[in-house]
């Protein structure tokens, strides 16, 4: 009886470990992390052109905050200032250098974007309405999920989400033109209250507001 109990516990422990792939970590992240803050570095790599010895890349730095359901803020501060805010109704994009704000209905644009994988859903089933999700093994010390958009408009080719022991570490995005963006997150503060005003946006005076 004792041996059978030990064997059962060992098998149960193995089953838990076997489920700790990228999909299982994404599921836990969606269900357990209700709000969070983190720093990020984003590297955008453009397709290599004829005659170029290397692909062109741009690196940006900023701060990311979110609160479920559907509220987030990407604040780029280096090398150029840009703010993206989702307030639950509207998705705002403020380009400081262009003195321009673009406002879109959040419901129409968020569902099939990479940000939706982090903040929009609360379960794999919910995300599955917009993405075909699959475990993508381990690489670079991370457990990966591959997300293929079900909406085939060509703008987004695929997204890869990397977790390290349940913590979101990297987001890799490839669009239909071959451009690749890699966001690396650090300094996560999970389930700490984020002030509500961080998810409100008021266009600055004199700035052009475009509503496509």
Image: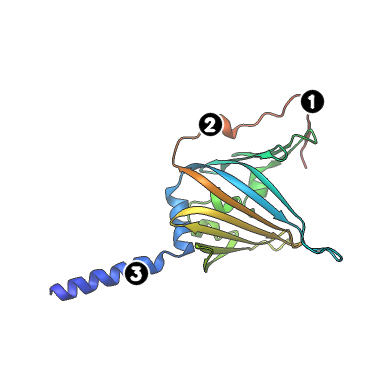
Q: Going 49% across and 42% down the picture, which residue do you hit?
A: 36
| Contact check, label 1 and label 2, Cβ < 8 Å | no
- Image quadrant where one finds the N terminus: bottom left
Please give left or right for residue 23 compared with residue 115 in the image. left
Q: Is residue 122 visible?
A: yes
Residue placed under numbered mark 3 in the picture: 15
- Disc 1/disc 2 C-alpha distance (Å): 25 Å
Disc 1 crowd rating (10 Å Cα; few below 14, some 14-19, many 20+) is: few
Q: Residue placed at 79% from the left, 25% from the top?
A: 206
* Residue 9 point in image, percent of width and height: 24, 68
Q: Secondary structure at mark 3?
A: helix
Residue 54 lies left or right of residue 2; in this view the side is right
Question: Mark 2 vs mark 3: which is more N-terminal?
Answer: 3
Secondary structure at badge 1 equals loop
**Residue at the far left in the pictured view:** 1
Along the viewing direction, whichever of 13 and 50 lies nearer the viewer = 50
Measured along the vertical axis of the image, is residue 64 above or below residue 169?
Answer: above
Q: Which residue is mark 1?
A: 206
Q: How is the image coloured?
A: rainbow
Q: Residue at x 28, y 72 (%)?
A: 11
Q: Which mark is residue 196?
A: 2
Which is more toward the observer, 212 or 19? 19
In the picture, residue 87 is in which quadrant? top right
Q: Which part of the image, by quadrant, shows the C terminus? A: top right
Would residue 46 appear left or right of 184 to someone viewing this image?
A: right
Foreground of the two, 170 or 151: 170
Distance between the alpha carbons at the discs numbered 3 and 1: 59 Å
């Amino acid at each position: 009886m004792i041996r059978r109990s030990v064997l059962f516990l060992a098998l149960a422990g193995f089953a838990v470990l076997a489920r700790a792939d990228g999909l299982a970590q994404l599921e836990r992240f969606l269900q357990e992390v209700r709000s969070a803050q983190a720093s990020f570095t984003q590297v955008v790599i453009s397709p290599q052109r004829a005659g170029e010895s290397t692909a062109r890349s741009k690196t940006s730095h900023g701060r990311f905050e979110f609160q479920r359901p559907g509220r987030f803020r990407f604040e780029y501060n280096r090398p150029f200032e840009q703010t993206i805010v989702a307030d639950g109704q509207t998705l705002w994009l403020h380009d400081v250098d262009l003195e321009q704000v673009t406002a879109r209905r959040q419901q129409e644009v968020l569902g099939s974007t990479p940000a939706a994988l982090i903040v929009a859903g609360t379960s794999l089933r919910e995300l599955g309405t917009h993405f075909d999700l699959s475990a993508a093994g381990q690489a670079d010390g991370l457990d990966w999920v591959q997300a293929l958009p079900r909406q085939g408009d060509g703008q987004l080719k695929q997204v890869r989400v990397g977790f390290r022991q349940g913590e979101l570490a990297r987001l890799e995005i490839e669009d239909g033109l071959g451009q690749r963006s890699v966001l690396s997150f650090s300094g996560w503060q999970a389930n700490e209250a984020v002030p509500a005003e961080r998810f409100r946006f008021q266009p600055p005076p004199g700035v052009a507001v475009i509503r496509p």
